Amino acid sequence: MLDLTKAILIKELDDGIIQCRVCNKNCIIKPNEKGHCQTRKNIQGILYTLNYAQVSSASSDPIEKKPLYHFQPGTETYSIGSMGCNFECPFCQNWNISYANIEKFSTKKITPNELIELTKNNLCKSISFTYNEPGIWLEYILDVTKLAKKNNLKTIIVTNGYQSDESLDLLISNLDAANIDLKGSSKFYKTLCNARIESVLKTIKKLNNAAVHIEITNMIIPKYNDDKEDLSNLIQSICDINPEIPIHFTRFFPQYKLMNIEPTPIEILEYAKKLAKDIGLNYVYIGNVPFVDNNTYCPNCNELIINRSSFNVNKINLTSENKCPNCGYSINIHL
């Protein structure tokens, strides 16, 4: 049986109806109903979270798998996920937990204190909230991030970036890094995710202004978000925020409701990488493709900074001030 925890960031309306303010869906939830993410339930006029400390997946991973290439490179992160999502993506890679009924799905309870101990015992330097959307796990993540900071552990979210301003205000003080999935054009968000790109870009800006380390993932799906003009606009939107933000163009493989779509041609990923560099992004990578050059190079002189093979870091070539040893350019990296 799930433990019920009172939800935060709510607005009480008439007749026992509650508005959830955790994400930008702003769900209006009637008694005995759940919000869009299926993890927040109105029980007799009180909104409860069903997923506090409820874990569907947990493992120790190279941090490069998140993917984060510029945050604690070469270290292990303890990855943990729950259930539910506030999006409706037909291409979801983790649909079996994102869209499952948490009241009928078998989960394991891991308290914040237990998670800290698991992270230490696995010799990890950070905790990554991932697999499903962490934005809807807010109450648990807030408790964990506070404990992690006291224990000299970093915290990371791998997210769709659809948190409300109120959620971000609570998270920012203890959050260290985020990989944000910037999925496509405004039309892509409306038709495939039932969401707004403006809210995601606002999240990126807010985290960037708060000096939270950010990296972007864009999974390119043939016929859906591979239009060259749309790619250019997406890249420009990141460049306008901060050209130092790393981006990962990731290969799509048939999944969930898009089994009829072919894997992303390598040529499109290579085109996107070149386009991003031409527009002005300094760190561009390709994901889900073996044997590509995903080393990090100095944007100023092209000196090799980090040598990688798959998710393994072979060498880091930096000065003690995180500068290029050849030209002195400051590299956007957190060791």
Image: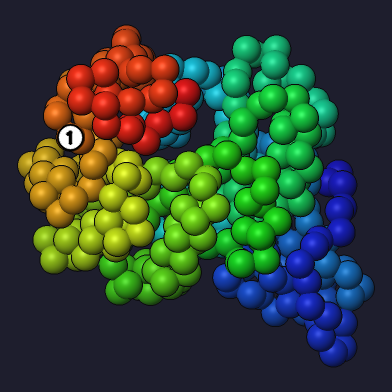
Q: Does residue 327 appear left or right of residue 241 in this picture? A: left
Q: Does residue 231 appear left or right of residue 8 in this picture? A: left
**Image spot of residue 273 (x, y percent):** 16, 43
Between residue 103 and residue 173, name the one nearer to us.
Answer: 173
The residue lying at 17 percent from left, 61 percent from top is 232
The residue lying at 57 percent from left, 56 percent from top is 85
The residue lying at 62 percent from left, 43 percent from top is 175
Between residue 177 and residue 8, name the one nearer to us.
Answer: 177
**Image spot of residue 322 (x, y percent):** 38, 25
Locate residue 106: give its quadrant. Answer: top right
How is the structure coloured here? Answer: rainbow
Q: Does residue 242 appear left or right of residue 79 in this picture? A: left
Q: Is residue 71 above or below residue 284?
A: above
For disc 1, the marked residue is: 300
**Image spot of residue 257 (x, y percent):** 36, 55
Q: Is residue 63 above or below residue 19?
A: above
- The answer to whether residue 206 is seen in the rendering is yes
Q: Identify which amino acid the numbered label 1 is placed on.
A: Asn
**Quadrant, the N terminus:** top right
Q: Does residue 39 appear left or right of residue 245 in this picture? A: right
The residue lying at 88 percent from left, 70 percent from top is 46
- Most extreme residue toward the bottom is 14
Q: Secondary structure at mark 1?
A: loop
- Most extreme residue toward the front is 328
- Most extreme residue toward the top is 314
**Image spot of residue 44 (x, y percent):** 91, 73
- Most extreme residue toward the right is 44
- The answer to whether residue 137 is seen in the rendering is no
